Structures are given as structure tokens and as C-alpha cells.
Image: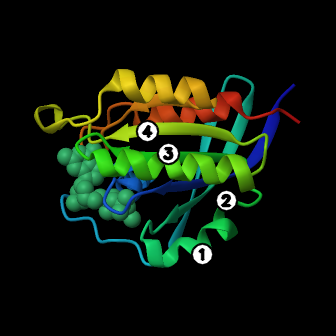
Amino acid sequence: GHNNLNAKLVLLGDMGAGKSSLVLRFVKGQFLEFQESTIGAAFFSQTLAVNDATVKFEIWDTAGQERYHSLAPMYYRGAAAAIIVYDITSADSFTRAKKWVQELQKQGNPNMVMALAGNKADLEEKRKVTAEEARAYAEENGLFFMETSAKTAANVNDVFHEIAKRLPRA
Ligand code: GDP
Ligand code: MG
């Protein structure tokens, strides 16, 4: 039968990794070279049709700065899905992504669908994190992995699509 699902989704990751840009690309099909940094968190919603269901994503785009860290549980608690974003040109952002994964494994919903997104894949010449390393980490930790580019739109819809497919059906 046909299912309509509402799914709370949170984006976590280092400031500057491209969380807001991924959301803007997914929701509005746009990209800004000078995306303003997020204060606290921002909310968006977007509906996606997958094979057997219509999924309405309720998206919380968080700020990423350490000073907002204590607010993060408000956004990931009760979330059905999380996208942990790092920037493939920043090893530090990958380290930070792994910390978010650990936090979600400890404190998050155990059935949460988690995606690891290596963003800024268009900046191949500045790459610091290999896809192999990130894929291995994702496999060990039960996330699915994709490299994305909010700038070129590569794999952006695909991440949300894959999450929609993996959400438990009512
Ligand atoms: P956030 O702090 O994680 O929300 O990151 P933003 O979405 O604000 O992006 C930080 C900066 O990186 C902005 O200047 C964006 O234009 C840029 N950016 C985001 N995604 C990409 C991408 O896929 N490729 C490139 N080249 N730049 C990106
Ligand atoms: Mg932001």
C-alpha cells in the first residue's frame, strides 16, 4: 500500500562543511558561493516520493560551532535520520564527523538512519580525505557513505533518496 511518512532529519558536522549548502541545493536547487553561516539552527521541509511512499522530511540544519554543541541533542533526539557532513578538503572536519557519529551512537535513536556525506567533492585537487578511508569508516559504523557536491549537485538528491528508502515503514 501507499505510505506517507514524516521524518525528522538532522544535519551535523563542522562549521563550513556545507550542511546549509546541501539543504539549499536539496530544497531549492540553488547554491551560494558565500552561504551565510547558520546561527543556532534552521528548519526546512521537503517532500520526496520513493517507490512505495511519500516522505516528508522535516530538516534541522544545525550550526556546527562548538558553542552551540549543547543544543545539538534537541535536534537529533527523536530524529529518524541524520546526515553527518564533512568537507573532503579538511581532515579536521572528518575527525569532527567521527565525533558526531560517536555521539549519535551513544545518545541518538538506535534505529536512526545515518549517512556520512563527504561534501565539496568538486574540489578534487584539494582533497585531504580519501573516499576509501571514509567508506571503510562508514561501513564499520553502520552508516552509508556518499561524496556530494552542493556546488555541482552531485549526489545531493541521492543522499536524501537513499535515506528515504532506508527509513522503517509503518
Ligand atoms: P555549513 O557551515 O556546514 O552550513 O557550511 P555552508 O553551507 O555555510 O558552506 C560553507 C562554505 O562552503 C560556503 O562558502 C559554501 O559556498 C561552500 N560550499 C558548500 N558546499 C560546497 C561544495 O560542495 N563545493 C564547494 N566548492 N564549496 C561548497
Ligand atoms: Mg550552516
Element under disc 2: helix
Label 4 and label 3: CA atoms lie apart by: 12 Å
Question: Where is ligand 1, by quadrant?
Answer: bottom left
Residue type beneath disc 2? Tyr
Determine the residue positioned at 67% across, 59% down: 76
Instruction: Tell me if mark 3 has few (under 14), some (14-19) or many (20+) residues whose alpha carbon lies within 10 angstroms of its own.
Output: many
Residue that carries the numbered disc 2 in the rendered image: 76
Label 1 and label 2: CA atoms lie apart by: 11 Å
**Residue 162, percent from left and from top:** 58, 29
Numbered circle sitting on residue 137: none
Q: Are marks 3 and 2 in contact (CB under 8 Å)?
A: no
Residue type beneath disc 3? Lys
Mark 2 or mark 3, which is nearer the start of the sequence? Answer: 2
Query: Considering the image in quadrants, where does the N terminus appear?
Result: top right
Mark 3 or mark 4, which is nearer the start of the sequence? Answer: 3
Instruction: Tell me if mark 4 has few (under 14), some (14-19) or many (20+) residues whose alpha carbon lies within 10 angstroms of its own.
Output: many
Mark 3 CB near ligand 1 (8 Å cut): no
Residue type beneath disc 4? Ala
**Colouring:** rainbow
Residue that carries the numbered disc 4 in the rendered image: 117
Residue type beneath disc 1? Ser
Q: Is residue 32 visible?
A: no
Numbered circle sitting on residue 70: 1
Instruction: Tell me if mark 2 has few (under 14), some (14-19) or many (20+) residues whose alpha carbon lies within 10 angstroms of its own.
Output: many
Q: Are marks 1 and 2 in contact (CB under 8 Å)?
A: no
Q: Nearer the viewer, residue 4 or 16?
A: 16
Residue that carries the numbered disc 3 in the rendered image: 98
**Residue 3, percent from left and from top:** 82, 35
Mark 4 or mark 2, which is nearer the start of the sequence? Answer: 2
Label 3 and label 2: CA atoms lie apart by: 16 Å
